[in-house]
Image (cartoon, rainbow, N blue to C red):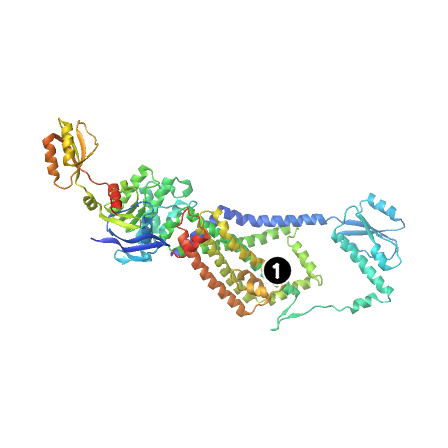
Amino acid sequence: MDNLLEANQVSKNYGDYRALNNVSIQVPKGSIFGLLGPNGAGKTTFIRIINQITMPDTGTVTLDGEPLQPHHIQHIGYLPEERGLYKSMKVGEQALYLAQLKGLSQAEAKKRLKHWFERLDIGDWWNKKIQELSKGMAQKIQFVVTVLHQPKLLIFDEPFSGFDPINANLIKDEILKLREEGSTVIFSTHRMESVEEICDHIALIHESNKILDGKLIDIKREFRSNTYEVGLVTENKELVAKELKERFEVAPATFKTINDELQYTIKMANGNPNDLLGYLAQQGRVTHFVEVIPSANDIFIQAVQNH
Amino acid sequence: MNHLSLIIKREYLTKVKNKAFIIMTFLSPLIMVALISLVAYLSQLNNDKVRTISVLDESGLFLYQFEDNDDLKFETLSAITLEEAKNNVQESDVYGLLYIPNSQSIDSLAQSITFFSEDSPSLIVINDIERAVRRKANSLKLEENGLDAEQIEGLRVSVQTQLETFDGQETSEIGSLLKLIFGGISGYLLFMFIIIYGNMIMRSVIEEKTSRIIEVIISSVKPIKLLLGKIIGTSLAGVTQFMVWVVLLSVLSLVVTLIFGIDPGAMQADQMQALTEAGGSEAKVYEIYAEFQKLPMTNLVIMFLLFFIGGYLLYASLYAAIGAAVDSETDTQQFLLPILVPLILAVYVGAFTVIEDPHGTVSQVFSFIPFTSPVVMLMRIPFGVPIWQQILSVVILFATFMGTVWFASKIYRVGILMYGKKASYKEIIKWLKY
């Protein structure tokens, strides 16, 4: 597969503290790549290395097949977790300045800003100072300056913190739109629920090490445990429940239903789910039979435990 | 446009457009001129009163010896007793009574002259009186010993040492004074510039840190470029402010002089006069001009620029490093002290040691230490410093500057991304290894 970004055996020390330990990550072109891990795992260090804010001690990083060089900065848009803008500068001036630092000409930057300000419905903020805007409004400006130079690679570090749900949704849609327009997105977060919605690839970083990476769907397949949620309407509940517990690994489950039924999560050690379904069908009327798909959170916890 | 010039432009424009900056730029000279004018006006007001002094001369020796001047008027009393005279004076608005008793010898007479007044008179009044008495008493004493006062005056040799260096440069006392002023002004200017604009740079670094924009910026430009752009942009704003100050100050003092007739420069002129008592003012002006011509102007200007830039950049980079290391301005104190100490030391060495002996060991040593050399050397150069010393000092200064910029950019690079950590010296030394 064609990778936009490849990190090979990247390590970084801060004094005695090892922030990254031989981390290799491939980010496929056109993907939304989730960089996951708890706080302090090394995500931000890794992102700073991609942005050439810090240099790796060992290992290499390539963008589009070329080793990272200063000019690559123009092709990267970065929204840091610790973000902000000059408080006493006017919105328009500030956005122009930041865009020019990314290599856009003044005229081009102005044109694109006008477009974006209209798109996000913030056109009349041009002459306002940041300190006059609310935090959510400032975040919108910050988003615009991040994507304005149409970078090949977009890096968002905890992008939704500080956004209210409406704006968070708006930004999420914009991120998806940008991907359609050809950008590759790295999306760093410790909030797993947002990952499910938009990421197609993920890498897990834990205590400076990458412990898992790949396509989200492949990882989910790998972490599937042959577990099924079942609902069964039967005459003699107690007998069936007892027999089920003898034959399978059973845990109680709850899901919405309109029936008076047995609800279980059943984990099959190995074997065909059809055997389970066949068995259940003999006992009564099957109302519910769903494979349990591990959530990113489950995967993360399991991966950390296995590590 | 490339990054550096973009950053310089932004730094310059934000500073110049800042309201506080604009107010300071236009208000400071106004306040300064107003203050000086006020002081000048008040002291003029104070001096305006002409005081009358009655003289009761029983010896008859001092008739017409007291000349009226701007501050004092003398009137001679005769044919009354001391007690009567005292009463008269107390009743009238005469300031005081000078009583010269009759006496056998000049010596005892000179000891027994008394001045009566309501309050204790100022030093100036006493000086005026004593000078007149002394002059007359002296000539009387000479006469008594059979010497002719005028002859003695004619025999007095006027001493004025001609000062000349070995390469044939003539100097004079006025020349020395001029050099002192030139050196003092450049040294002090540099000192002020460093403190005012160094602080401004530091604050601007802290602002970028606290507003959290720093990471956005350095994902676009190298920290060292941001550091340089900040220093240069702020310095340009500083130069602009300084120029406005110079222009405003000269215009304002001119206006004040024309409208109110108060000369803020008059006070200094008075002091100058005290230093160079002899000679008419026209001759003095000419002499000052001539001495001015003799100053090694090219050398001075080139070295002024080099030391000013070098010294300023040296300190500016340290100020920036401090800004990067802390989270708020209140945390800067512990780091500012080590910067201020050599700077203040330089000014003191300049103000005391260099004036006493521009080429003494202490002056020489401090004019090579890079943290004091800009101020001290600038004060020494007008007195003639061998060119090799100047060059050596400049080289040391710029070499150190490279060192501090390296040091500062290291701290800067790490420090700007350290949020919420209180930096200690130990911590900062660790950063150098990152």
Instruction: Name the residue located 71 percent from the left edge and 48 percent from the top edge.
Output: B46
For label 1, the residue is B352
In which image quadrant can residue A285 be found?
top left
Eyeballing the image, is B126 above or below B156? Answer: above
Q: Residues within 10 Å of mark 1 (few under 14, many from 20)?
A: few
Q: Nearer the viewer, residue B203 or B297?
A: B203
Eyeballing the image, is A178 above or below A287? Answer: below
Q: Position of residue A99 (x, y in %)?
A: 35, 50
Tell me if A98 is positioned left or right of A295 in this view.
Answer: right
Label 1 lies in what chain? B
Tell me if A103 is positioned left or right of A282 in this view.
Answer: right
Q: Nearer the viewer, residue A144 or A119?
A: A144
Instruction: Name the residue located 50 percent from the left edge and 46 percent from the top edge.
Output: B20
Q: Nearer the viewer, residue B111 or A78?
A: B111
In which image quadrant can residue A63 be found?
bottom left
Residue type, mark 1 in image: Phe
Q: Is residue B331 visible?
A: yes
Tell me if B419 is positioned left or right of B145 in this view.
Answer: left
Tell me if B361 is positioned left or right of A180 in this view.
Answer: right
Q: How many marks?
A: 1
Q: Position of residue B193 (x, y in %)?
A: 53, 55
Q: Is residue A106 visible?
A: no
Q: Nearer the viewer, residue B324 or B434?
A: B434
Q: Position of residue B368 (x, y in %)?
A: 53, 64
Of helix, strand and loop, which one carries label 1? helix
Q: Position of residue B394 (x, y in %)?
A: 50, 65
In which image quadrant can residue B223 be found?
bottom left
Instruction: Name the residue located 65 percent from the left edge and 56 percent from the top edge.
Output: B268
